[in-house]
Amino acid sequence: MANQKNNDASLEITFPKLSHFWMDSGLLGLYKIAKEENPSEMKVEMYLTDEGLTFKGSEDNLTALFNKSYESLLDQYYNKSTEKQRQKNEGFYYDSKEDKFVRFPKVKSMGIAGLIFNKAPRMTVKQVKYDVIELTEAGKKITKKVLPPEYSHLQDRLEVFLSESGLKISANNFLIDGPNAIQPQVEIKVKKGKEKGKCFICGGPSHSLTEIGGTVYPMITGSSGVLSFNSNGGRPEKVCWKCDFLGKFVPVNGFYVYNNESYNIYFPYSSSLVKMSEVYDDFQAINIVDDPNLLKNFENRLGGYFQRPFEQLFTFLYSLYWTVLSKKTTDNGDHELDFEKLFDVVISKAPLEFYTINTTALGDTQMGKMIWPFNDSVYLFRLYDKIEKNNISIKEVMAGLIDYDQTKNDNKTMMRNTVCERVLKKSSIVELIEQHAYHINKSKKQYIKPIHDFVIEYEKILKEGNDKVDQAIIDTAVSLGKTIGFSVASAGRKGKGDLFRLRKTRKPEDFLNEINRIQIKYGALVTADLYGKGQEFENNFLEFKQFCMIAALNTFNAKSQN
């Protein structure tokens, strides 16, 4: 994988870009973490190009920089504590230099780091096993953990420490000079040696190979469950130390959200590594460093109940739009899309896409269900902007798509997820919105104006550039729906019943007959525009009826509320 040269005791190591979103994210992660460690002060040169990441320095200095960067990575991304764990602070160790007991919070790896390595923490420096003795208290025999003979002189002080702190001995080992921590193993061997084989991932020759597994790429279960498409990768499946090393740095470039035992993960990705680095700096604006429960690492601006893959992606991209790609236009907090910023972030140098991973729990591990690149973000960011310029709150639209009638929480956003999927794929949603609007209003009255406004504006945007007849049909259908809803609203439940009866019609002639009945019954004034559409009405009947019924229900709710 790497190109190494030995010139006057100086080594040059280049990690090339592999054009794989996971490994290139690790490459960017190594660059960002190493940069924080000030490599120049460690006499190491480092520079990033679109071809890869290069380090120059002596063997000792390179090894020191890589080790220090790895320690920093583990502290920032793997050894995380929830707010509750920080409050409890229930771990402790003995500091032999300071001759005192030190408390520390328990740690866990969450998000992308948890996907890579989800094993229990282990000692960082030293530990000795407690002795177990039997005691009799109040006539009952109990067991107690005490320090072994070589540390028995600390027993009384340990008892006092535990009493004052309220802690208990819950582990089998007494920690010395450091806490427990999550520490996935890596080998750092910068000095070139005798070639031992080819790397499974990069195909390059290497003097240090390890067995492939989930800590390199979690979608790989192990050496028995993989198939290499790299002609240089041989069997058994092993990876070079550099690919193994990079695999641990992937969390730096990713965003995640966790709920219902499922992860949704997003990686900004480009064919240009320099572009990825620049975008990384911009996108840190939405990063949440310490979520109280470590369930997400980005800000959600669209409210709660986001559970499924497509609705989660929709809200992640909206957070980027609002925080990174829009600019404030008034003192009231109004925003609009910053097209210059959009060009710089998404289009300039090389296109930007977002790799999305959805996983689900399989026992104690996570199984990948879906991996796909979303490369239509310009369309979506412009859609957000156009919708909100028409005074339609996307947050209210998302709230209006929740089905609170569902008994299971997991089912409450099934419709919203499907709607978001279709929006992401530039597909029509009017059928879904009409179905949802009448479902949630079947036995009660529920506010639907945001989704009513959204579907009309969205469908018109989809039809931009098409025959103007399409947009005219929408306008006619909405106008008719408003007239009908206004006319039947005064009749209350009976009027609502007539709406549902009109909705049940399946043929154009039945629909027109029902419209005539409503005209006679309520004195509704239907414009001649409907009858003038003729063939266009029949050709677009289902879509026409859906727009009409959404507008009718929205007007009915508004009028009857008044």
Image (tube, rainbow, N blue to C red):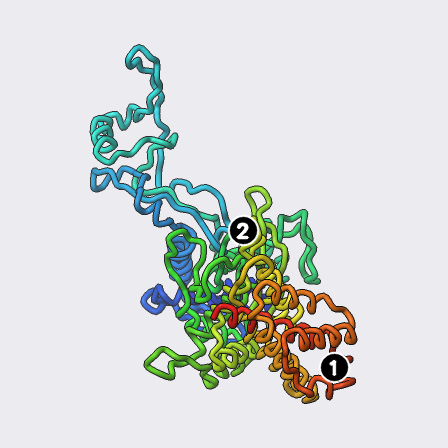
Q: Is residue 471 above or below residue 520?
A: below
Inspect the image, locate mark 2, and give the three-letter code of the amino acid beneath it.
Asn
Residue ranking furthest to the top: 139
Q: Is residue 337 above or below residue 423?
A: below
Q: Earlier in the sequence, mark 2 or mark 1?
A: 2
User: Residue 155: x percent and y percent?
Assistant: 24, 26
Q: Is residue 104 visible?
A: yes
> Circle 2 — which element?
helix
Inspect the image, locate mark 1, and give the three-letter code of the amino acid beneath it.
Phe
Q: Which residue is mark 2?
A: 409
Is 473 placed left or right of 133 in the picture? right
Q: Which residue is mark 1?
A: 537
What residue is rendered at 30% in x and 38% in y? 93
Q: Is residue 32 above or below residue 543?
A: above
Where does the N terminus fall, quadrant-wise? bottom right
Q: Is residue 427 visible?
A: no
Where residue 550 sits, quadrant-wise, is bottom right
> Circle 1 — which element?
helix
What residue is rendered at 37% in x and 49% in y? 81
Is 101 placed left or right of 196 in the picture? left
Give the camera-side residue of 17 and 107. Answer: 107
User: Residue 544: x percent and y percent?
Assistant: 69, 77
What residue is rendered at 67% in x and 77% in y? 519
Which label number is shown at residue 34?
none
